[in-house]
């Protein structure tokens, strides 16, 4: 007498007989080597963030050129050479020379220092002004919210570049005043972003629980609000960096930003426009530098935005 289940063959047949007809057999999971898995993930990352990586690489290259300007630039950016004015691009001067005989490529490399400095300081000033205002308005609510947001709306009523021109004209044309003016102009945008984010976060359960157990307000803001509000602020700050570059070039073009002989991309375009018909390179190459850097920052900012978006990250898997 055979005991049921003691025969492996009969047990297998019994399992097959009891399996529903609509339930297909689950195929075994194929083994994937670790190095192949890593290469697939890198391939997927490059495919999903191609433009972002290209933009970040361009920004990094320009940043390195700015930091290493004395090493990589072939000439002095300020010293004049009146024996070689308006020379076309050549092996000695890859981007030609301007009306004072100064090497255009060298001045573009040194001008990137001004561009990075203005973008960084302007965004920093905007964050230092906008973050406290936005957090206070969103967290306190009531009268504080209405007063602070109406003040921000009053600043937002003016076109940013017009307001920047007014501020720089009031305090005097210089790089420092241009940076401070741009920081003040962009602070209301940061304030509105952080306020809207704070309004949602302060209603979360963990914030309510922190209130219940008596956690101080400043600690709640520092430990719970700001860390959870960093994603939209980072995206907004990245966009502002690109706007600040364009605005600085505009102010320098109008003579309100960086003053000669300090090289600035906007100032180079302004001083070279009188020679455009006979020497296109004195305007073309600085203008291309502005376009390429702004495009690179925007692409990198788009990648940061997508990387911080959980829905986009899920779609990548």
Image (spheres, helix red, strand yellow):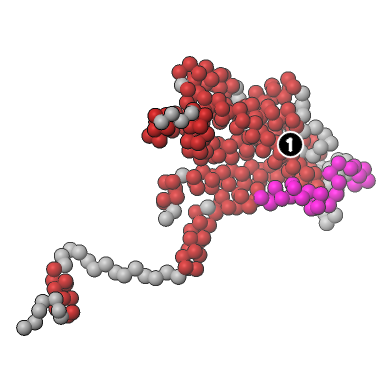
Q: Give percent across and percent down for residue 266.
A: 74, 36
- Can residue 154 be seen by looking at this rendering? yes
Q: Is residue 208 above or below residue 307?
A: above
Q: Give percent across and percent down for residue 263.
A: 79, 39
Q: Is residue 283 above or below residue 16?
A: above
Which residue is at 44% across, 46% downward? 310
Q: Single out the residue that lies furthest toward the right.
A: 83
Q: Single out the residue that lies furthest toward the front.
A: 213
Residue closer to the observer: 46 or 286: 46
Magenta stretch: helix, strand or loop mostly: loop
Q: Is residue 278 left or right of residue 127?
A: right
Which image quarter is the N terminus in? bottom left
Which residue is at 51% across, 32% downward? 219
Which image quarter is the C terminus in? bottom left
Q: Give percent across and percent down for residue 229.
A: 49, 36
Which residue is at 49% across, 28% downward? 217
Residue closer to the observer: 139 or 72: 139
Q: Which residue is mark 1?
A: 266
Q: Is residue 263 above or below residue 182?
A: below
Q: Give percent across and percent down for residue 303.
A: 53, 47
Magenta span of residues = 60-89
**Secondary structure under the numbered disc 1 in the rendered image:** helix
Q: Is residue 122 left or right of residue 222?
A: right
Which residue is at 14% across, 79% downward? 6
Quadrant of the rendered image containing residue 271: top right
Quadrant of the rendered image containing residue 282: top right
Residue closer to the observer: 271 or 211: 211
Callout count: 1
- Can residue 273 be seen by looking at this rendering? no
């Amino acid at each position: 007498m055979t005991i049921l289940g003691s025969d492996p063959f009969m047990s297998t047949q019994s399992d097959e007989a009891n399996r529903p007809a609509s339930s297909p057999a689950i195929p075994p999971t194929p083994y994937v080597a670790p190095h192949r898995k890593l290469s697939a993930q890198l391939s997927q990352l490059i495919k999903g963030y191609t433009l972002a990586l290209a933009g970040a690489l361009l920004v990094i290259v320009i940043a390195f050129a700015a930091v290493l300007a004395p090493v990589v630039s072939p000439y002095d950016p300020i010293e004049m050479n009146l024996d070689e004015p308006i020379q076309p691009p050549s092996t000695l001067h890859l981007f030609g020379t301007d009306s004072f005989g100064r090497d255009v490529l060298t001045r573009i490399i040194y001008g990137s220092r001004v561009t990075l400095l203005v973008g960084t300081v302007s965004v920093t000033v905007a964050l230092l002004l906008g973050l406290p205002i936005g957090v206070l308005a969103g967290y306190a609510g009531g009268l504080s919210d209405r007063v602070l947001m109406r003040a921000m709306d009053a600043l937002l009523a003016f076109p940013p570049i017009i307001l920047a021109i007014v501020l720089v004209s009031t305090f005097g044309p210089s790089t420092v005043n241009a940076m401070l003016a741009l920081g003040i102009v962009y602070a209301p945008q940061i304030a509105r972003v952080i306020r809207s984010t704070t309004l949602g976060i302060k209603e979360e359960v963990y914030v309510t629980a922190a209130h219940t157990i008596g956690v101080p307000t400043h600690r709640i803001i520092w430990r719970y609000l700001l860390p959870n509000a960093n994603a939209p602020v980072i995206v907004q700050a990245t966009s502002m960096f690109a706007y600040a570059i364009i605005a600085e070039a505009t102010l320098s073009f109008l003579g309100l930003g960086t003053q000669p002989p300090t090289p600035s991309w906007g100032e180079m375009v302004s001083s070279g426009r009188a020679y455009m018909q006979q020497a296109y390179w004195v305007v073309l190459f600085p203008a291309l530098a502005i376009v390429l850097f702004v495009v690179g920052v925007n692409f990198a900012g788009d990648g940061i935005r997508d990387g911080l978006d959980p829905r986009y990250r899920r779609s990548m898997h």
